[in-house]
Image: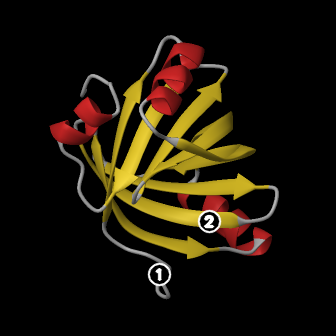
């Protein structure tokens, strides 16, 4: 994964039950809608606490490596992929599981906020250089 596009940001994810209630709270507390898109995440076999996934959208395919500690995910690296590279990685590592989602992307200052709706679960993810409990309070959310 040389030629990383960006490195070391934190992501904190938590499962949510009421998607519309969460979206309403985000807007009420100042989040701005950026975009809505469909994506497919393909998780590749990795050791525990390490995540290697291919994220495919209509306009791009990315390889993302994360390190997990409870609900916190450190983004180690991201890299653009061709479809051929993505297929080669799937063959090399093997596919652990796949998930298709509709993603609603908000911004809150320098923070990216994602609400992912998929058939098996719905999640809220915050992504920034650092994420603390204060951010959750500002957004009217409960920290995981």
Using a 10 Å C-alpha cutoff, classify the residue at mark 2 as few (fewer than 14 neighbours), some (14 to 19) or many (20 or more). Answer: some
Residue 60 spot, x, y in % from top left: 74, 65
Task: First in sequence, mark 2 or 1: give its number.
Answer: 1
Residue 125 spot, x, y in % from top left: 43, 39
Q: Secondary structure at mark 1?
A: loop
Residue 114 spot, x, y in % from top left: 52, 41
Residue furthest bottom in the image: 3
Badge number at residue 26: none
Q: Is residue 100 visible?
A: no
Q: Nearer the viewer, residue 40 or 22?
A: 22
Residue furthest left in the image: 133
Q: Which residue is mark 2?
A: 62
Q: Is residue 58 left or right of residue 109?
A: right
- The residue at 52%/14% (across/down) is 21
Query: Quadrant of the rendered structure where residue 32 is?
Result: top right
Q: Secondary structure at mark 2?
A: strand
Query: Quadrant of the rendered structure where residue 92 is?
Result: bottom right
Q: Is residue 81 above or below residue 22?
A: below
Q: Is residue 17 visible?
A: yes
Using a 10 Å C-alpha cutoff, classify the residue at mark 1 as few (fewer than 14 neighbours), some (14 to 19) or many (20 or more). Answer: few
Q: Nearer the viewer, residue 81 or 92?
A: 81
- The residue at 28%/35% (across/down) is 138
- The residue at 50%/79% (across/down) is 5
Q: Which residue is mark 1?
A: 4
Q: Is residue 26 above or below residue 87?
A: above
Q: Gap between marks 2 and 1, in whole Å?
A: 10 Å
């Amino acid at each position: 994964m040389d030629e990383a596009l960006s490195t070391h940001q934190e992501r904190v994810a938590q499962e949510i039950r009421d998607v519309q209630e969460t979206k309403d709270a985000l807007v009420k507390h100042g989040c701005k809608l950026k975009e809505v898109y469909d994506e497919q995440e393909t998780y590749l076999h990795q050791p525990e606490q390490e995540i290697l996934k291919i994220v495919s959208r209509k306009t791009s395919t990315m390889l993302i490596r994360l390190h997990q500690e409870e609900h916190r995910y450190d983004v180690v690296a991201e890299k653009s992929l061709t479809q051929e590279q993505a297929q080669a990685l799937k063959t090399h590592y093997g596919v652990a599981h796949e998930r298709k989602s509709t993603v609603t992307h908000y911004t809150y200052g320098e923070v990216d906020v994602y609400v992912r709706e998929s058939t098996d679960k719905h999640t809220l993810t915050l992504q920034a250089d650092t994420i603390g409990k204060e951010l959750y309070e500002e957004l009217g959310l409960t920290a995981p």
